[in-house]
Image (spheres, rainbow, N blue to C red):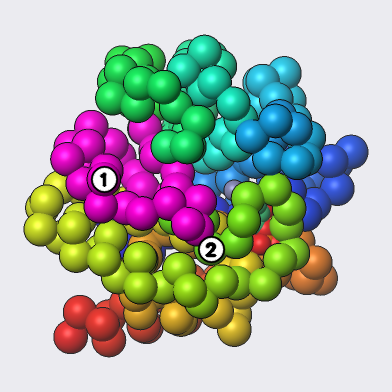
Amino acid sequence: MGIQIAPSILSADFARLADVAAAVEGHADWLHVDVMDNHFVPNLTIGLPVVESLLKATGLPLDCHLMIADPDRWAPAYAEAGAGSVTFHAEAAHAPVRLARELRRLGSRAGLGLKPATPVEPYADLLPELDMLLLMTVEPGFGGQPFLDVVLPKVRRARELLDRHGGQVWLQVDGGISPETVERAADAGADVFVAGSAVYAAADPGAVVDGLRAAAEARSAARRA
Ligand code: DX5
Ligand code: ZN
């Protein structure tokens, strides 16, 4: 699949979401939608009704990142609504295998998210049930936080696990991704990059997406050479 870029609308103007999506259409692979419930994380954003409206307003597939408690109960509705990818958190899920299978059955890709301090190794055997592993490179909850370099060794270990597993599981990094940090993350083996403030604080969000992709592609090619 190569390198993919998923701009996060968290740092954009929530009153103009159709325009926010249009600003990166033709540049981005996904639109990353951060759903927060004020329980799993100390912040509250948007939920299913807004996702349903966004699906009608953009041609970009939606990458729904659920930072919510009890995803076993709430996540399937996002797949049913038509989200292309639904990621739930390992720290919140009660039955991750059952939930991942349910998301896939409903036609979505299934993603598993890990906070910075959650190790990846306990989930190695679950990889065949997943389409994506999301490693948070900030504590989830807010945009605009500095990239946590301490997560990079875990990104490398996850890359090794995924390569050994031999499947087609994507490795996403989320938090603090910018032109300054994207190369470090690509060098560690990430292939899907979420960027919120770096994209939407810029005058030309599409150009930032293109720049992130070019930088990540160059590092990724060098890593595999
Ligand atoms: C944080 C969210 C991220 C956030 C990233 O909890 O999951 O997707 O939007 O924002 P930046 O790129 O500004 O760190
Ligand atoms: Zn996110």
Q: Does the segment drawn in magenta span residue 133?
A: yes
Q: Residue at x 18, y 85 (%)?
A: 225
Q: Residue at x 77, y 40 (%)?
A: 43
Instruction: Please tell me the numbered disc located at residue 137.
Output: 2
How busy is the neighbourhood of tag 2: few (under 14 within 10 Å), some, or many (20 plus)?
Answer: many
Percent x, y for residue 192?
42, 58
Percent x, y for residue 190?
37, 65
Whether residue 58 is visible to the viewer of this picture, yes or no, is no
Kind of residue sitting beneath label 1: Pro
Sooner in the amino-acid sequence: mark 2 or mark 1: 1
Q: Quadrant of the N terminus?
A: bottom left
26 sits to left or right of 164: right
Q: Residue at x 70, y 48 (%)?
A: 141
Under 8 Å from ligand 1: the CB of mark 2? Answer: yes
Highlighted magenta segment, given as a residue range:
110-134
126 sits to left or right of 4: left
109 sits to left or right of 212: left
